[in-house]
Image (spheres, helix red, strand yellow):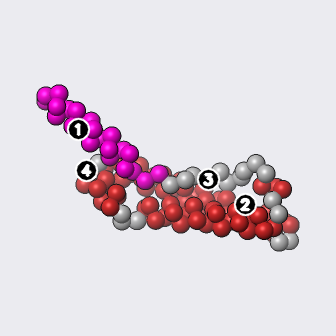
Amino acid sequence: MNKGVLGAIALLGLFGLSACATPTVVDSRQAGDESLSCSQLAAAIEEAEQFEADAREERGVTGTNVAAAVFFWPGLIGTYVNTEEAIEAAEERQEYLRDLQERRGC
């Protein structure tokens, strides 16, 4: 292959990697969680629920995911692995925060 074709392939690969979804993976326990008030715990749970919803949305059929399936299928696999990790982390955080709420009688 000539250098121009290799360069185009490399550029397409970099574009494919940058187009992959990367939802936020939250820590299930964060510094200061133990000192949150009941209202702050409720807000943190809502935030974790939104992280989960965003990750589930990234997993669906989106233009980026269709393009990844056609042009760069390893990117699609990476998207699904990352979204699964983000969903599990958000669910664990919600469970932990609800446990804190229950212990405090919120």
Q: What's the distance in space between the residues labelled 3 and 4, CA to CA?
A: 30 Å
Looking at the image, residue 42 sits to the left or right of residue 62; the answer is right
Where does label 4 land, which residue?
71
Please give the label number shown on residue 45.
Answer: none
Q: Are circles 1 and 2 on residues that touch, CB within 8 Å? A: no
Where does label 2 land, which residue?
96
Sort mark 3 into few (<14), some (14-19) or many (20+) by Cα contacts within 10 Å. some
Among numbered discs 3 and 4, the one appearing first in the sequence? 3
Sort mark 2 into few (<14), some (14-19) or many (20+) by Cα contacts within 10 Å. some
Where does label 3 land, which residue?
26
Q: Secondary structure at mark 1?
A: helix
Q: Nearer the viewer, mark 2 or mark 3?
A: 3
Q: Amino acid at mark 3?
A: Val
Q: Amino acid at mark 4?
A: Phe
Where does label 1 land, which residue?
9
Q: Who's the residue at 36% across and 65% down the image?
A: 61
Sort mark 4 into few (<14), some (14-19) or many (20+) by Cα contacts within 10 Å. some
Q: Secondary structure at mark 4?
A: helix
Q: Who's the residue at 76% across and 64% down the image?
A: 41
Q: Are circles 3 and 1 on residues that touch, CB within 8 Å? A: no
Among numbered discs 1 and 2, the one appearing first in the sequence? 1
Q: What's the distance in space between the residues labelled 2 and 3, CA to CA?
A: 12 Å
Q: What's the distance in space between the residues labelled 3 and 1, CA to CA?
A: 34 Å
Q: What's the distance in space between the residues labelled 4 and 2, CA to CA?
A: 40 Å
Q: Where is residue 42 shown, x and y percent of the image? A: 73, 68
Looking at the image, residue 92 sits to the left or right of residue 66; the answer is right
Q: Which residues are magenta?
A: 1-22
